[in-house]
Amino acid sequence: MTIRRYLALTRAGIMESLQFRLGTFVTLLGNLLYIILVYFLWKAIYASAGTESVNGMTFNDTMIYLILATALFNFLEMFVVWDMSRSIQSGKIILDLLKPMGFRGYTFWSYSGSHVIMFFLTFLPTSVVVFIITKGAIPLGLNIIWFVISTVLALIVNFNIEMLVATLCLYTESTWGINIVKETIVLLLSGASIPLAFFPETLSKAVSFMPFRAVYDIPLNILLQKNGTECMSGLLPYLGFQALWAVGLTVLSMVFWNISVRKITVNGG
Amino acid sequence: MAEHAIEMKDICKDFKVLNRHEGLKGSIRDLFSRDYKTVSAVKDISLTVERGEIIGYLGPNGAGKSTTIKMMTGVLEPTSGSITVNGRIPYKDRKANSENIGVVFGQRSQLWWSLPLIESFKLLRDIYMVPQKDYEDMIELYRSLVDIEPILHKPVRQMSLGQRTLSDILAAFLHDPAIVFLDEPTIGLDVSMKSKIRSLISGLNSEKNTTVILTTHDMGDVDALCKRIVIIDKGMKIYDNDIEHLKSYFGSYRTLKMRIGTDEWEEIVIDEKTTDIMDIIMKKQKEKKIRDIKIEEISTEEVIKKIYEGDAK
């Protein structure tokens, strides 16, 4: 059974993440500071707007959205690009390439354990706190199930974006700059730092076709039952959009990776 | 199962390298340069390795050892020539090939850094789909060969270099591969650790009949483990035979050791065909008092040095 391999990697990932407890707590603290900053920033924005709601979102809506987006970001965050560039420079990548399983699968499942831990340490507590403070801004119903499905799709999309950029590392050798650009683009265009509702119309139209919103914006909308996701006819297009990108990006990143690895085996690394 | 563990025929490997220019101007020019040159790292190497052999794979730095090993593992594709490992073409079927080989690359570790060694073993057991029974037998074998108790529950990051290397070697043998590649396994280790690792390698080799390809710069490894050695230099195979034969190449060579003055030994390698040992001793004696004299057969180290320096043939 091949599933045994994957679960073994998940298990090891969980144990490894637990070794770095302190790191997780620092992340939590950092988030708290970030959220305080965001709170005052948006408070000022709403004060200067002078109206109760801006772009159809009240101050409370915006805060709930951004807090959950931050938690979701921690939950889904991967360091494929970073790890890949390190293992290329140290030559360790050979050892990973010589595992009797596909490199992409190996990488994906190696990260799965840390996702599990981050879910329990950041996303779940944050959601519970938001739920208690707002007295039910997160509806408890079928949307939770849809949210789980949507998050898995988001995970796949995110992984493949990471993998595409990481594959670039094989060519450039230096990745710091590329990684920063990728991170900024993803954070901005996915709606993790500014809700997409605030984007100018043309930009928001363009963004709505891009894969980035499949990572944060769609799962959050589904969780909060916003923008028509409360009924099936509104929900399905969102999930379809995610699934489409998940499949498309998987194919794309797989092809790009295979071509690149082939190039390395021909030209040496 | 194929007849031979490894079979390579007329393997060549060329790399395309960008011609780099000097200075800032040159670096900017390089950004747009299409000026490649071809470097051949490996030229026409043919090699057959039988099952259960331990081969010392030697050569000076940059001779093309790593490149050949990468081709055997399937990470590199040869430019020309044919290669089969366990009857498979490694670069065409890297995944299947990986199931039957183990690797230890000098300073890099495949172990999970923050976890106890036993967890890495369990993980590798699952990744390589080793049946539980075989896994337990293997651990039992390890126990009989080395004292693994003190390191089994120790996180890898807290291990000494020696313990880590030992663990990496154990990890490479865990799925009972047909061939194990050991790339400088004793680099940076102390004398007692080196001998521990040597006896572990020879123990595993004789118990499991594993083929071992060993690259090293430590002639002690070669003397302790290898019956056959292959030497390559500048991408070409310059020697492939057993170690005794190698010494007979230099059969007329002796190492003359003299202790002159307090306790410093002076070493001279002498070819008896051309020079008379007694002449040298007498000449020395006229200059200073000799306290002690030893005449030894040439050591492997000296032989290898002579070959690298181009004195063979």
Image (spheres, grey):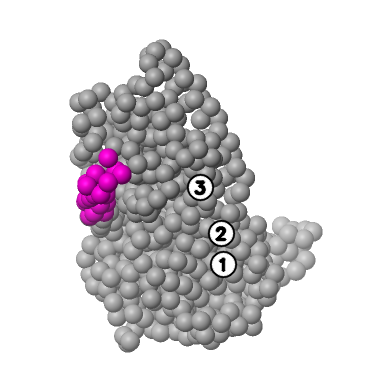
Taking A77 as reference, is B271 left or right?
right
Residue A224 rendering spot, x and y as whole percentages: 38, 40
Residue drawn at (46%, 20%), measured in percent from left and top? A43
Callout count:
3
Residue A242 rendering spot, x and y as whole percentages: 26, 48
* Residue occupied by mark 2: A15
Chain for mark 1? B
* Residue occupied by mark 1: B119
Q: Which residues are magenta?
A: A228-253
Residue B79 rendering spot, x and y as whole percentages: 23, 62
**Mark drawn on residue B77:** none
Observer-nearest of A29 and A81 = A29
* Residue occupied by mark 3: A124
Chain for mark 3? A
- Element type at marker 3? helix
Query: Is tag 3's residue or tag 2's residue first in the polypeptide sequence?
Result: 2
